Image (spheres, rainbow, N blue to C red):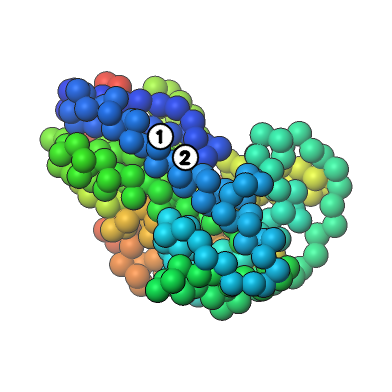
Amino acid sequence: MTATSTHRTTAAADWRALGTSVRLVTTDPALLDSCNLLLARHLAEVDAACSRFRPDSELVALDQARGRPVRVSPLLAEALAVALRAAAATDGAVDPTVGSAIAALGYDRDFRLVQDDGRPIRLTVRPVPGRRAVTLDRATDTVTVPAGVRLDLGATAKAWAADKAADLLAEAAGCGVLVSLGGDTAVAGEPPAGGWRIRVQDATGPVDETPAPGTYATVAIRSGGLATSGTTARRWRRGVHDLHHIVDPYTGLPAETPWRTVSVAAATCADANAAGTAALVKGEGAQRWLAGLGLPARLVANDGTVVTTPGWPASAPAWSGPGAAA
């Protein structure tokens, strides 16, 4: 997604962290650099706590605990609590115990390395252990994960980190802030005039490049979060199998879905992203499920057909000034 502001005094910074694109926009250009430093520190802390690709991360340490209770940082405890809530809210369609399943598909390292590995694999239907296998005691921030169960917070951690960062920066700077992590977008503070204009698109790309006609919509939000989940951005091939990173917890395999992308607006980016990912897993019933929850959403079918749920923001006129990747 790509966000643009109607207010020409906004300022933006772009870089990479957590294996994805980062974009920060502030409504006060003078505060951009200081906010960017705070954001970099926050994301470094999130990476150290939640990465499944860093051998020294707290999350990887849980894999090595072999079922013993582990005292974790408040940051990882909060991230895991968000993941477990998402699993409960989506009836298990989004679940943090997919770690072993997604690793078995070959996504066991930075995605740029996954794409270069075409060795064949055997696909086996095996439901993941499920959220109830994990015990989290928030009073002591103690986590117990059964031996053999690996956690993956990919469906919730970046969106949660965007929410947390936007709130932190808006409070510290006293201005409007947009934080986008790989398209998971959270806003906080006073928005620009007309709101934050976000280009929701089916393919990732630079903020200054407009996608092909029909593959995007521009909407405006003033608070909360907006996220797009899809099966087209992170795809790889292993042997004869074309794979993607949206794992169906009921099978342990890439979700078979009629949708290529689902975009959701919600009170938080974490809620939006969890709902979008769950919708891909739920398949044909996704539109009804999202509407029943009162979540505004835009679903794009594999043939390009677009459907929306009640409340999806009306299309806002695009602005040709500098944008903010969302």
For mark 1, does the 10 Å Cα neighbourhood hold few (<14), some (14 to 19), or many (20 or more) residues?
Answer: some
* Location of residue 182 with respect to 137 vertically, above or below: above
Q: Nearer the viewer, residue 321 or 104?
A: 104
> Residue 267 at x, y = what percent?
28, 58
* Location of residue 290 with respect to 313 vertically, above or below: below
Q: What kind of element bears circle 1?
A: helix
Image-based side of 78 in relation to 10, left or right: right
Q: Is residue 244 visible?
A: yes
> Residue 147 at x, y = what percent?
71, 71
Image-based side of 173 in relation to 165, left or right: left
**Is the C terminus in the top left, top right, bottom left or bottom right quadrant?**
top left
Q: What kind of element bears circle 2?
A: helix
> Residue 311 at x, y = what percent?
26, 58
Amino acid type, label 1: Ala
Q: Residue at x 59, y 49 (%)?
A: 57
**Is the N terminus in the top left, top right, bottom left or bottom right quadrant?**
top left
C-beta proximity under 8 Å, tags 1 and 2: yes
- As drawn, the label of residue 44 is 2
Q: Is residue 228 visible?
A: no
Q: CA distance from mark 1 to mark 2?
A: 6 Å
Q: Nearer the viewer, residue 69 or 311?
A: 69
Image-based side of 141 in relation to 224, left or right: right
- Total number of numbered discs in the rendering: 2
Amino acid type, label 2: Ala
Q: Residue at x 35, y 70 (%)?
A: 293
> Residue 145 at x, y = what percent?
62, 70
- As drawn, the label of residue 40 is 1
Residue 272 image-quadrant placement: bottom left
Residue 250 image-quadrant placement: bottom right
Residue 207 image-quadrant placement: top left
